[in-house]
Structure formats: structure tokens, C-alpha cells
């Protein structure tokens, strides 16, 4: 089909964003599910959309895919405005929303054939390779109602892959998977990223997001609280040094005399341990200096343990779940 | 808000641009579904064994089972049980076939319209970017492609048995003792009767009692001594003129003629085609209304029950009950409009009376209310078809997936 250039929408190809959302609002009656969300998902990354249940993660993905209509805001997928150019944008998007649900009375292959028929083009030719990649080719002719939850998740991924997606939107893809399945899914997602695809991963499993994603957005009550590369977000968070020693009160006195800047008075005793809480990153040399000071003061040091703030702790600290102040 | 930059450059995945997207999107923007979409929707429906069993049973199974039993009994005891094919059986079978056609059409439609919603597959389909309208039309095409051939096949079997496994056909029908050739229109019947006044005289005489031939071929009717005079004018005469009698009563004579013809003579090929098309229309209407209600309500149980109640309870009541000031409302019912369009050689087509401008036979006679002209019936049917299709499309495009 010959397409005149004037018919083509102006794509924002110069941007490096797979998803761009500005001021998105979605209400259900008086309940605001998505509240003025701004989101930038960089191309070629695994991006975690992290939030507690009911935070509006799925609603955002549904709005992006045109499954529900947003009240206001602007959205772009792969540089194309949606819903204006939704059909074109979604031609290179694979998505699982909530749990992947298929026709139980059809086989896995037939379900994919149905989706391929809807997508058109050469998607049909990718069915076998997609099934093989997610490891369910041997069960492709079985009815989906005989599939386990994990197999349905894999079939959902295969349904995304038939589109040869530039962007995958996976909503809670780890749900129902056992530890081995989660590891496999994680590797699969990393594999997609290595191929240059973008994966937008919505989840409430912080550990999985931390292990899988490069960047993350924290959402709560429909609002994006923070977003950025995980390393960057965790920089500036607390680091705890636990010192097991023979005389913690005496050790505390000596360390206070060192007048450490990053310590900022965060020091305490827990049974036979001294707990130092630092703000930001501390150098190994500082830890060695502390050790040396204590030993030279005649205090026996039995162990030094460094505890970095995990994404989970950070998440809890920035979301309203911590303390339950407004729930 | 943190500004993020691309963390990785695309490696193997092909580059994306609006131009390639437009190429890849193919016919997605079109409202017309692609052939694979229709085929896959057909597959999805065909794989529902319970539904398909019911559809086949009520469309194809009904004539096959009934005619099969009649044929077997005939083969076992030909002296007692005649050949299965007969005009009356044809009429008696088309009646339930039309009712079952509507009901099973509605059931299939409600299923086609709602299962991807109830099973959660709808959002996967929508997420492909395909036009929702084309998805709706793919359901319509797929469901029609399943049920209409089945109805057609069942009816074809009935036609074949009627034509080839019945008694030899007479070329005449007996109307009040007169042997009249078959397949005459009202005008042709009138012409034929006017050319056979003696047979009419005999018939009239037989119908009114003792008679004798009077002057100029007139007939003395009954015991009152009145004469049927060919040149006399009714009613101010003791004589009944056969020609005047035919001209004045041709409507009721034709009704009787048709009644005899339908009861004793197989329908012509043309009449069979008309009945077949009517059956298909009834089934198709049930299907598209069911499809629309299924898509609107997002389930199949309630639409199916609603349409069953409409067709089996409400329509018969409103087609037999004259409600003052609501006649036009009654006529707007799809069941009534379809009944009015019933061709001859269906059970409802037999009877007397009725209104309209056409022959005083056909579906209009099974109604207890004054009928509408044919064009008005067609308009009512079109309104139902278009209205419900628009409703289904509107709901489908607005539905949250």
C-alpha cells in the first residue's frame, strides 16, 4: 500500500523514550485511580512500575493500551500519541494486563493464532518461535484450561512476542510463578532488554523489580512519587554498619570521638553490637579506620557487617505504607 | 521528576518508526474484519462442543431426526406408514424450524458477543490495536457463517424429502368439488373458473343443498325455489350467476384454493426458496439481536433468556391480542414483523382473513391484529437489525477492557 507522507503522523523518533506520560488522570467516579502521573520509560531498558496493591499500576497500563479512557493527560508510546495513533503504536507493543486470560477450550497455539489474526501482517509466522522461546511448544496443542498458572504466564509472554514488540508491558508477570519460574521469567525479561526491547514491568514485588529492572517508578495512591535508575534512587539512602565487639559502650565513646561527618549522630547499642547508621555512601577506608581505632583502644572486634538499604526498605520509607499514617 | 536517558541501545530488535508502524498495521484501521479474524472466530465458536451440539441438533437435527424416523417406520411397515415427504409435513416442520432457528440464532449470537469479555480475552484482542468495530463484524460474520448454512442444510434435506420421498404429485387440487389446476395466481384462478361455469354451478349446488337446473343454465338453490341464473345479478335475484359469484367471492375462493394447494401439493421450487430464505432471515435476526445483547450486557445467559421470553411468550400474546392505542407498538415487535412475512407452505401461512393489500393468505393470517403493508414489515425488520447492530457496536467501542 502506498502511503503518502502527509498521512503519516509526526512521530517523536528523536526521543529515547518508549513511553511518555504527562499529567495523566483517570477517575472511576470520585475515586482517582491515576492522579496527574508523569512517567518516562527509556527505550531499551527494563523499567519497573512499582507500587502497592490498588496504587493504580494496572489502570495506567490499561490507559496506555486504550483499554480504558483516561480523563486527561497526554500519552505517547514509541513516539506516537495515543489514543490518536493507537493502532499504529500498538502494532509493536506486546502486553499482559492483570493475569493473562485465554480461551480455555482452545489450545495455546489456537489462542495465539487468534491474536495473530487480529494483529495481521506476518505475526502468524512468529507463533512457533514464540512458543518455543517461552518453553511451552511441547504443550502448544493442549487446551489452555489444562495449563498451570505459570504456563499461562508464559503463554502471555508468547502472545506478546508474536508482535515482535519494541515495547512489552507486563503487569505482574511474576504472579503465580514458583521461585524457579520467577528466575526464568527474570532471565527472559533481561533477554528481551538485551535484544534492545523495552520492558515496562508493573509489580508489587520489590525484590523482583530490584533484580530485574534498570529503572523504577514508585507509585502510590495513583501518584508517581519518585522515578529514576535504581542505583541513582538508592544513592543517598541509609547504610548501616553493625559492629560486634567486647565492649559496645566503650566502642561508642571512641567512635564519637572520631567525629565522623556522615554518621550525623546515628549511633546506638543493640545487645553486644554497636549500630552505626550512615547517610549516603561510605568508603571502605572509613570502615577500616573504625576497626583500627577500636582495636587500638583494646576493644575486641568480632565482626563488621555492612547493611545497605534495599529497594524494599526505601520503598516503604517513601510510600504511605510506612507507619500507616493516612490509611 | 527525574529525567531518564536510554540505558541501552536497541540491539537486535528492528527499529521502529511511524512509517514502519503504518506498514505493519495493515488493515487494522479498517472496520471490515480480515478473513483470518473471521476464521479464527469461527474456530472459537466451533470448539464449543455443547453449543455446537445444540446448534446442530436444533437446525440440522430436527428435520433429520423427524424425517429419519418417518422413513424408518415406512421401510419397516410400508402398508401402514406412507412415504415421509408430504406438504403437510413440510409445513409442520418449517414452523418449529423457524422458532428453533430464532432461538438458537439468539443463543449463538449472545455467545459470540460475550465470550471474549467473560473469559477475559477481550483485553488481549483490544491490546492488538485492531478496530473494535471490525472485531464486532468478525463475530457477526463468523456466527452467520456457522448457523446459516446449517439452517440451509436442514431445510434442503426437508425439501429433498418432500420432493423425492413423497407421494406422486397431482396436477389438480379439489376446491369444493372442482378439480382446479395447481400453481394458479388469483387472477389465473378467476379466469379458469370463469371458463368453467358448469363446474361452478355444480359446486355451488353441492354446497347449498338440493338443486335443479333452471332456465338459461341457472340453478335453483335449496328448497326455497330460488334459481341460479347465469344472467341474473346478485343479490336481488332468485338466481345465482356463477360468473358474478366468482368475481364477487374470488378472495375467499382463492383462500380455499391455496388452503387445498398447501395441504395437498408440494410447494414449487420458487416457493421452497422463499420459505428457505424466510427461515434464514428469522435465524439471522435472532443471531444479530443476540449478538448485540451479548456484547451490550457482556454475558450470554440473560440475553438468551430475554429473547426466548420475547419470542415464545410476548410475541404470541401481542400478535393475538388487540390492544387499543398500542397496535403500532405491537407491530413493531420483530416476531410479528417476521410472522407477517411468512411465505405460504409454512404452518402459519394457512388460514383465512387477515389484512394487508396482498393475497388474503400467508403469515398475516396467523396474526390477530391488523397487519402492516409489506414495505412496513421490512422497515420494522431493518430497524431491528440496524438498531441492535449499532447498539452492540456502540457498547463494544465504549466498553472498558
Image (spheres, coloured by chain):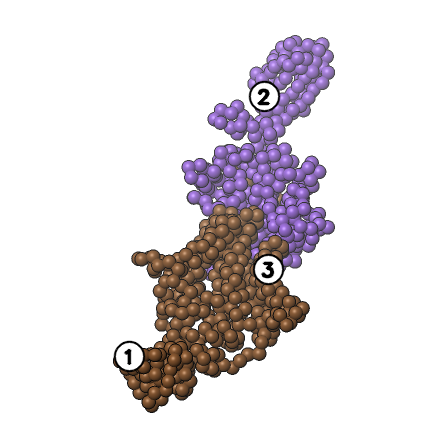
Which residue lies under the disc numbered 2? A262
In the rendered structure, find residue B235 and report the number of the disc placed on it. 1
Q: CA distance from mark 1 to mark 2?
A: 125 Å
Q: Secondary structure at mark 2?
A: loop
Q: CA distance from mark 1 to mark 3?
A: 57 Å
Residue depth check, mark 2 versus mark 3: number of the one nearer the observer: 3
Which residue lies under the disc numbered 3? B57
Q: Residues within 10 Å of mark 1 (few under 14, many from 20)?
A: few
Is label 1 in contact with label 2 (beta carbons under 8 Å)?
A: no
- Is there any visible trace of residue B384 in the rendered image? no
Q: Residue B132: x percent and y percent?
A: 50, 55
Mark 1 or mark 3: name the one nearer the start of the chain: 3
Residue depth check, mark 1 versus mark 3: number of the one nearer the observer: 1
Say which quadrant the N terminus of chain A sits in: bottom right
Left or right relative to B86: residue A30: left
Which shade of the palette goes to chain B? brown
In the rendered structure, find residue B373 and report the number of the disc placed on it. none
Query: Could you say which quadrant of the image residue B228 lies in?
Result: bottom left
Q: Residue at x 49, y 36 (%)?
A: A222
Amino acid at each position: 500500500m502506498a502511503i503518502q507522507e502527509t498521512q503519516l503522523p509526526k512521530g517523536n523518533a528523536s526521543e529515547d523514550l518508549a513511553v511518555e506520560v504527562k499529567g495523566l488522570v483517570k477517575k472511576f467516579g470520585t475515586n482517582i485511580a491515576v492522579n496527574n502521573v508523569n512517567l518516562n520509560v527509556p527505550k531499551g531498558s527494563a523499567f519497573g512500575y512499582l507500587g502497592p496493591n490498588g496504587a493504580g499500576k494496572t489502570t495506567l497500563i490499561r490507559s496506555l493500551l486504550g483499554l480504558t479512557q483516561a480523563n486527561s493527560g497526554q500519552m505517547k508510546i514509541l513516539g506516537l500519541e495515543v489514543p490518536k495513533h493507537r493502532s499504529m503504536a500498538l502494532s509493536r507493543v506486546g502486553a499482559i494486563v492483570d493475569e493473562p486470560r485465554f480461551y480455555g477450550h482452545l489450545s495455546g497455539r489456537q489462542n495465539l493464532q487468534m491474536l495473530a489474526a487480529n494483529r495481521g501482517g506476518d505475526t502468524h509466522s512468529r507463533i512457533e518461535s514464540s512458543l518455543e522461546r517461552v518453553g511451552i511448544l511441547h504443550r502448544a496443542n493442549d487446551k489452555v484450561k489444562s495449563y498451570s498458572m505459570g504456563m499461562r504466564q508464559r503463554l502471555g509472554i508468547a502472545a506478546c512476542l508474536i508482535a515482535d514488540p519494541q515495547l512489552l508491558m507486563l503487569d505482574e508477570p511474576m504472579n503465580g510463578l514458583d521461585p524457579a519460574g520467577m528466575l526464568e521469567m527474570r532471565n527472559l525479561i533481561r533477554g528481551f532488554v538485551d535484544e534492545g526491547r523495552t520492558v515496562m514491568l508493573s509489580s508489587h514485588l520489590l525484590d523482583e523489580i530490584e533484580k530485574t529492572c534498570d529503572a523504577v517508578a514508585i507509585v502510590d495512591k495513583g501518584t508517581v512519587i519518585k522515578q529514576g535508575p535504581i542505583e541513582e534512587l538508592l544513592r543517598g539512602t541509609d547504610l548501616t554498619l553493625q559492629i560486634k565487639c567486647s565492649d559496645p559502650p566503650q566502642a561508642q565513646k571512641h567512635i564519637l570521638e572520631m567525629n565522623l561527618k556522615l554518621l550525623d549522630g546515628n549511633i546506638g547499642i543493640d545487645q553486644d553490637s554497636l549500630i552505626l547508621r550512615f547517610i549516603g555512601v561510605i568508603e571502605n577506608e572509613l570502615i577500616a579506620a573504625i576497626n583500627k581505632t577500636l582495636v587500638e583502644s583494646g576493644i575486641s572486634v568480632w565482626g563488621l557487617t555492612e547493611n545497605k538499604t534495599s529497594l524494599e526498605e526505601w520503598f516503604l520509607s517513601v510510600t504511605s505504607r510506612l507507619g500507616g499514617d493516612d490509611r | 521528576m527525574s529525567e531518564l536517558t536510554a540505558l541501552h541501545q536497541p540491539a537486535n530488535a528492528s527499529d521502529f518508526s511511524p512509517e514502519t508502524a503504518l506498514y505493519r498495521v495493515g488493515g487494522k484501521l479498517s472496520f471490515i474484519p480480515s478473513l483470518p479474524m473471521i476464521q479464527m472466530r469461527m474456530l472459537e465458536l466451533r470448539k464449543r462442543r455443547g453449543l455446537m451440539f445444540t446448534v446442530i441438533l436444533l437446525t440440522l437435527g430436527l428435520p433429520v431426526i423427524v424425517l429419519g424416523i418417518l422413513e424408518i417406520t415406512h421401510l419397516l411397515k410400508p402398508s401402514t406408514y406412507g412415504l415421509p415427504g408430504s406438504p403437510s409435513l413440510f409445513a409442520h416442520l418449517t414452523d418449529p424450524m423457524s422458532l428453533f432457528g430464532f432461538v438458537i440464532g439468539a443463543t449463538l449470537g449472545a455467545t459470540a458477543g460475550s465470550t471474549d469479555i467473560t473469559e477475559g480475552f477481550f483485553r488481549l484482542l483490544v491490546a492488538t490495536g485492531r478496530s473494535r468495530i471490525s472485531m464486532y463484524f468478525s463475530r457477526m460474520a463468523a456466527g452467520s457463517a456457522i448457523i446459516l448454512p446449517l439452517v440451509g442444510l436442514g431445510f434442503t434435506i426437508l425439501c429433498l424429502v418432500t420432493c423425492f420421498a413423497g407421494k406422486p404429485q397431482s396436477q389438480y387440487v379439489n376446491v369444493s368439488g372442482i378439480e382446479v389446476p395447481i400453481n394458479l395466481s388469483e387472477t389465473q384462478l378467476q379466469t379458469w373458473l370463469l371458463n368453467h361455469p358448469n363446474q361452478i354451478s355444480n359446486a355451488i349446488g353441492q354446497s347449498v343443498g338440493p338443486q335443479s337446473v333452471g332456465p338459461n343454465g341457472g340453478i335453483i338453490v335449496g328448497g326455497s325455489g330460488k334459481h341460479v341464473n347465469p344472467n341474473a345479478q346478485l343479490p336481488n335475484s332468485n338466481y345465482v350467476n356463477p360468473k358474478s359469484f366468482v368475481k364477487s367471492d374470488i378472495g375467499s375462493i382463492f383462500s380455499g384454493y391455496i388452503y387445498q394447494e398447501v395441504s395437498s401439493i408440494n410447494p414449487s421450487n420458487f416457493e421452497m426458496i422463499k420459505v428457505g430464505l424466510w427461515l434464514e432471515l428469522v435465524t439471522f435476526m435472532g443471531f444479530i439481536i443476540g449478538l448485540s445483547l451479548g456484547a451490550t450486557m457482556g454475558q450470554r445467559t440473560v440475553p438468551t433468556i430475554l429473547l426466548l421470553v420475547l419470542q415464545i411468550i410476548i410475541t404470541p400474546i401481542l400478535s393475538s391480542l388487540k390492544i387499543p392505542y398500542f397496535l403500532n407498538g405491537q407491530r413493531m415487535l420483530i416476531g410479528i414483523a417476521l410472522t407477517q412475512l411468512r411465505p405460504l407452505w409454512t404452518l402459519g401461512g394457512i388460514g383465512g382473513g387477515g389484512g394487508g393489500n396482498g393475497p388474503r393468505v400467508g403469515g398475516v393470517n396467523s396474526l390477530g391484529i391488523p397487519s402492516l403493508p409489506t414495505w412496513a414489515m421490512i422497515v420494522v425488520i431493518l430497524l431491528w437489525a440496524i438498531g441492535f447492530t449499532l447498539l452492540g457496536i456502540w457498547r463494544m467501542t465504549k466498553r472498558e477492557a
